[in-house]
Amino acid sequence: VETDSWLENAANGLMGTQVIKKDGQLRFLVDIVLGFRFSMSGTYQKTGNRMYDVTMDDGAIVAGGFGLPVNLESKFKLLLLYTDDKIRITRGYNNIMFVHLRVDRS
């Protein structure tokens, strides 16, 4: 599928990680190819019972300890559809459904 958005491309099958911190910080890491990753950081704010406003505004292509800044900004609403101790399902950017599995990093 050809799209103009890294987020849509990630939703179409690229594997990645989402890190959510309690202080309102959010980060996506998407494995691109051969040790290169796309990183996008931003913030979220709860605006309703299951609704969040998300602003992603700090992007980079990362290889090892080096990063090349990418000038991107995405603002969208994120609806929490389901959550438990192991899985979270949301609908967000461009009405795409995301399924996140919790992985404990010991």
Image (tube, rainbow, N blue to C red):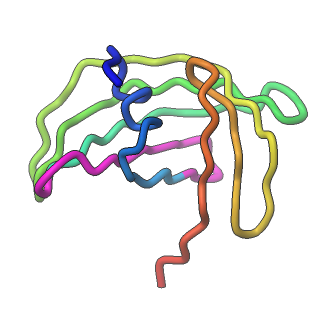
Is residue 82 found left or right of 55 in the rendered image? Answer: right
Residue ID at (75%, 31%): 79
Front-lying residue, 14 or 57 = 14
* Residue 62 pos. (x, y %): 17, 46
Left or right position of 15 against 42? left
Residue shown at 68% from the left, 32% from the top: 91
- Work out whether residue 19 or residue 90 is closer to the camera in this orientation and state it: 90
- Name the residue located 63 percent from the left edge and 27 percent from the top edge: 92
**Is 23 inside the magenta-drawn segment?**
yes
Q: Quadrant of the N terminus?
A: top left
Most distant residue in the right direction: 49
With respect to residue 45, does 86 lie above or below?
A: below
Residue 26 placement (x, y as % from top left): 51, 43
Residue 91, compared with residue 72, is above or below; it is: below
Confirm whether the magenta stretch covers residue 29.
yes
Which residue does the image show at 38% across and 52% down from the upper left? Answer: 15
Give coordinates of residue 38: x percent, y percent: 26, 41
Direction from residue 82 to residue 102 in the image, left or right: left
Q: Which residues are magenta?
A: 20-35
